[in-house]
Amino acid sequence: MAKPNVISKEDLIKYAMECLVDVGIEKFTLKSVAEAAGVTQGTVYYHFRTKEQLLLNIVQNICERSWAEISQQSTQFKINRAIESAKSRCSYDSFFHKLFFTLVVSSFNNEKIRSQLGEMILSENNALAKNLSALWPKSPIEGVTLETWGIIINAIVDGLALQALVRKDFPVEKTYKELEQLFNGLNRLLAEGVEG
């Protein structure tokens, strides 16, 4: 198969994101992406064999951009920025989480997608643990590793997003304000433990 040089994989992802916003997940096809990008379906198939693979690349792209933005913050603001970023995607109409959970469901019957999602979640957990290690010299609670904190925080964020997707009246602002208070409490616990 000849390598199409008309468009890059990254540009196709940008067009696919625009297409996804325009037509929605239900009507999203590789053909619609090809039309939006002004290329042949063969070009899209060259880069992405399936719709799910393209959707997975979109989710991964969003996550990578978010972590790149967070990593530019000073240490003291990284966690606050991460919480703010998570809150911004926590809504009844969340594009990102609708996409993410659609992929999760489809992965139950597709081991390749399931494995790739698992790797992506592991990467998110590790990024959280790494950012926490820059903020916390040790875990605020003895016996709970920073790696476990990364897993727990990621699970909390995804769980809150799921609740917001299914409940129009989910109290996003209140919940995230209290989540921030939880982290501030953990920071105080750690400071008291270091001082004591």
Image: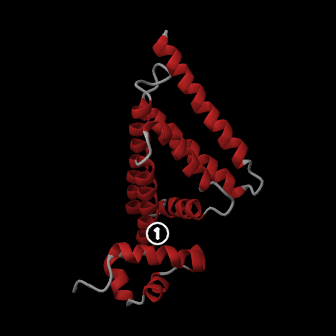
Foreground residue, 9 or 31?
Answer: 9
Which residue occupies the foreground of this view, 90 or 81? 81
Badge 1 is on which residue? Answer: 55
Q: Position of residue 108 (x, y in %)?
A: 49, 59
Callout 1 amino acid = Leu
Q: Is residue 26 visible?
A: no
Residue farthest toward the right in the current orientation of the protein: 169
The residue sitting at 38% across, 48% down in the picture is 123
Answer with the quarter of the image where residue 129 lies: top left
Outermost residue, top side: 196
> Looking at the image, which residue is at 44% across and 74% down?
14
Can the viewer see residue 115 in this picture? yes
Image x and y of residue 43, in percent: 33, 85
Residue lying at 37% horizontally and 52% vertically, measured from the top left: 119
Q: Is residue 196 depicted above or below 161 in this figure?
A: above
The kind of secondary structure element at disc 1 is helix
**Residue closer to the observer: 7 or 92:** 7
Identify the residue at horizontal 57%, vertical 32% (top origin).
183
